[in-house]
Image (tube, helix red, strand yellow):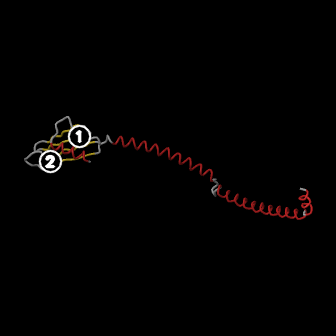
Amino acid sequence: MSNYMQLLHQNMETVYLVLAALVLLLLVIVVILLFRVSSLKKRFERLMLQDDGVDLEGLINNYKLMADDLAIRSEKLEQVSAQTCKDMERHIQNVALVRYSAFEQGGGELSFSAAMLDKKGDGVIFTSIFGRDEARFYGKPVKAGKSEYNLSDEEKQAIKEAMKK
């Protein structure tokens, strides 16, 4: 160990020069890093603070709040849409009209049967029978494509056509 100490004492100037060079090199590296950090800091500040005074963090938070609000609104719209579709099943959707001549003595096809049904086949069928001296109008309820009242062939045909739609 004493050999090392003696060698160190003999080359002390060289050791000081090497250490001084290393310190100088580290000092140059620190100065370069300070300039780079300063440049990055300026770029970061420009990124974070927009021209209109709004910072990027605030902007991102606002967009997050807006996205959350849109998600809630979208969920509500999906619920309303589902309820509307369910409700529409009960509305008149299928309509068919069958025109015919009720009497053999002519008069053209002025009589008709009109079926107005919902998706399940529930609704009403209206029949108008037009004759030379009189006209009659009937309405019959329809449940699942059938009626508890007797149906004419034309009424059955109107219901069948309406159920196809």
Give residue 127's quadrant in the image. Answer: top left
Badge number at residue 87:
none
Name the amino acid type tagged 1: Gly
Give residue 129's quadrant in the image. Answer: top left
**Local secondary structure at mark 2:** strand
The residue lying at 46 percent from left, 44 percent from top is 75
Find disc 2 in the rendering and name its residue: 100
Q: Crowding near pointer 2: few (<14 within 10 Å), some, many (20+)?
A: some
Name the amino acid type tagged 2: Tyr
In the picture provided, is 109 more to the left or to the right than 121? left
In the rendered image, the residue lying farthest to the top is 148
Find disc 1 in the rendering and name its residue: 145
Q: CA distance from mark 1 to mark 2?
A: 21 Å
Percent across and percent down for residue 67 are: 53, 48
In the picture provided, is 24 more to the left or to the right than 151? right
Percent across and percent down for residue 79 are: 43, 42
**Is 142 placed above or below 32 here?**
above
**Local secondary structure at mark 1:** loop
Q: Crowding near pointer 1: few (<14 within 10 Å), some, many (20+)?
A: some
Percent across and percent down for residue 94 are: 27, 45
In the picture provided, is 31 more to the left or to the right than 149? right
Pick whichever, 30 or 34, lies toward us. Answer: 30
